[in-house]
Structures are given as structure tokens and as C-alpha cells.
Image (spheres, helix red, strand yellow):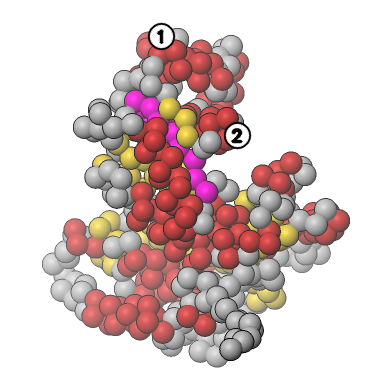
Amino acid sequence: MFALVDCNNFYASCERVFQPQWENKPIVILSNNDGCVIARSNEAKVLGVPMGAPTFKYKEEFKRKNIKMFSSNYPLYGDMSSRVMQILEKYSPNFEIYSIDEAFLRFDGFDYFNLEATGYKMRKQVRKWTGIPVSVGFAPTKSLAKIANKIAKKFSSKTQGVCMIDNDEKRIKALKWTAIRDVWGIGRQHGRRLEAQGIRTAYDFTNLPDSWIKKHMSVLELRLKKDLLGLPYIKLEKTVPSKKSITTTRSFKNNHSKFHELEERISTYANSCAEKLRKQGSACSAVMIFIHSNSHQKNKEQYRNSSVVTLPYATDSSVTICKHAVAGLKGIFRNGIDYKKAGVLLLGLVPSKERQLNLFQPNINKHDSLMKAIDKIHLRFGPHQIKLGNQDLNSTWNMRQEHLSKRYTTELKEVITVNNKSEIIL
């Protein structure tokens, strides 16, 4: 049997752990720069707040309906996710972290265990140790476990947060309940195509001929069909896959028109990308740079362009990546343009330990010790302690986070303090 454990409204739940006064009240989590809604509590969903709602359009409505706004606090969410996963992985040696708030477990050799009771135990332990509510779905395959989890969450008062699909009767009932667009791995495009063919539910999908799926879809969807039939065709992934590309892009607070201003921004973004690259143990083979003018200033000349620079060897060095990013910027920069946005994209990612050596570039590892030292300093003392020479040494770019909560579990200065004002009477 597989189990999918999913944290309920994870970002909202993380905020409520340390601010319980917002329990059972509507709250929304905002994206970078407080741009739009990326997560909602159930109470906010009932009030009609859509996913992706622009903050500037809904700000007055949030105030009118007493909906609390939180800026995204990723250090807190990441740490709380790690705490939840550490608890879950103790229940089975076959464990896969699927996302920041989801994990698959496979229970082989648990034939004489009451897995439903195990699900309730997991829920209780995670809730008690972290404060995060979770739902658990059990089924013979991963795709069915996904559906079981949705049922557990949708009908929480009846299921108490745990749903088990352990026979064909339950499987068929669950498939008939699940809309085709809600099936894990189908997506919008395939969902529209299937609905046009009269396929409305997951059960309808499982009745399609294999030949039709091969012809009109792909082998991945054929595996999904087998998985929904109760045959485990989708396996556990033992490791979290590395990103295939890494991007840092920002809109500027003010327009920039001079090269040295864009050079500083591009260097800062390239350095940020390189740090993410080293964190996942990868090296990049190419750097893409793009710049945009201010599209809202219709009375001024509009310009956008990009450039891809192929590196002489795969590297994770901030120095090398920034050098080539600036070289790419020189090729596309134009005077007289008010630039509002720029970004850096790292391409051709390969594992750092498996990169191809270059006979004519013997010093490809010359920055390794320097990068390790810089990363260690940033880990201990915080980011932006050391910068490259062409970065602005006196300023640090910060996102707009007007509703940011404290980093209760990752920043010593922001941990919860308890004031005990009770008097001791002798």
C-alpha cells in the first residue's frame, strides 16, 4: 500500500502555529513583493477569494471582510516542512518527499498492521509535534493514494482526515467521484481534450482503450491508467529531482537607463543563481540574460532583448557566471532606454561531480575553495555578507513584504518570547 500525506493549507497552517489567534479565521498568503494570493485558508476560500488574486485589486475587500494578509515567509515554511518530513520518514523506509507539503510512503511487509490506525497516529503525531494538520490517503498505487487524500481532506468530518481505498468497490466509487481535470498528471490541456471526447471522470479514463491513449496521448498517461486500475506502474522516487534551470528575475523599484546600473543588477541576480546552483550540487553550461523596458510607459520607446552565453566549461562559480552574464548584457544593452526589469537564467545544468573536464581549461576548479568558504560564511552569518566587486556594496535588494511574520524557527532574534508576569505568593 501507498500513503500520501498532505499538509492542509500548508502556508496558512505554518502562520497559525505561531499566531493561533487566526485559527478558524480567513487568511491569505501573498507572493513575492506581495503581488498576488498564492495560498488561502478554507475560510478565505468560502469568502470567494480566488487563487492568484492581485493584491492591489482585493486589498479593500480583504479589509472589509477582515481577511488577514501574510507575506510569504519561505524560511519558516521550509523549516516547518523539514520537521514534518522528519516525523513521517520514521513510519516507513520507503519514503519520497513529493513537494514542500506532500510525501509518499510505501508500506511493504505491513500486511498484519492496521494501516488506517497508522494514518490516525501519523496525523496525531505531526499535529502534536509541529502544530501542522495533515490528511492521509491510502491506496494500492500512488495515483489512487492522491485521490484518497483528496477524499480525506474534502470529507474531513466523516473521514477524520484518513481515507483508505483497499478494494475495487472503493476504487471505482472514488474514480467516479474524481473529475478528469483533477486526476494527478492529466493537466488542463489533456483535461479539455478528454472532456471533448466525453471523458468526464477518472473512471471514464480507465475505460479508454490502451491504443487510443498511446495514439492521442503518451506512454506516461498509459502508465497512469494502469495505476488508476490498481496496478502500481508509478514508482517511488528516492531522491528529489534537481531543477533543470535556475532563474532570478526582478522588476526594479525605479527605472534604470545606465549600463553600470544594469550591470550591478545582472551581477547580483547571477550571483543569486550561482548560490542556488551550488546548493543543489549542480553546475551550468550556459547563461541567459534578458532585459525589459517599462511597458507601462507607453509614451517612451519600448525595448526587450535577451542573450544566451555558452560557457567554456560547466561551472558553479559566482565569479565565472557573473563575468559571462555581464558579457551577455553588453551585447544587448541599448542607450536611451528606461529599463524596468532584468533577469538571469542558468541553463544546461549537470551534477557538479560529473561535469566534463576541458583539456584547454585546466583551472576550472580554481574557485571551488573560495565558493565553499563564501557559502559557509553566508550559512553562519546570513546572506549578502560577501559580494562581488561589481555589486553595490552599500545596498541589498529586499522584496516588498509589508505583512511578513517572524522567522520563528530559523532566526534566533525572532524566536517566540514568553513573558511571565504572575506573582509568587509565599
81 within the magenta span: no
So how many labels did they put on this image?
Answer: 2
Q: Which residue is mark 2?
A: 157
Numbered disc 2: secondary structure: helix
Question: Closer to the camera, 174 or 60?
Answer: 174
Residue 365 percent location from the top left of the image: 20, 74
> Does residue 304 appear left or right of residue 314 in this picture?
right
Residue 398 percent location from the top left of the image: 59, 76
Res 376 seen here: yes
Q: Residue at x 61, y 87 (%)?
A: 425
Numbered disc 1: secondary structure: loop
Q: Residue at x 47, y 55 (%)?
A: 128
Q: Which residues are magenta?
A: 133-144
Residue 150 percent location from the top left of the image: 53, 33
Q: Which image quadrant: the N terminus?
A: top left
- State the mark number for residue 344: none
Q: Which image quadrant: the C terminus?
A: bottom right
Q: Residue at x 50, y 61 (%)?
A: 77
136 within the magenta span: yes
> Does residue 30 appear left or right of residue 277 in this picture?
right
> Does residue 119 appear left or right of residue 361 in this picture?
right
Question: Closer to the camera, 28 or 138?
Answer: 138
- State the mark number for residue 209: 1
Tag 2–tag 1 contact (CB < 8 Å): no
Task: Name the amino acid, label 2.
Answer: Ser
In the rendered image, the vertical position of residue 16 relative to residue 316, given as above or below: above
> Does residue 412 appear left or right of residue 252 in this picture?
left
Q: Residue furthest left?
A: 359
Q: Residue at x 45, y 47 (%)?
A: 124
Residue 272 percent location from the top left of the image: 45, 71
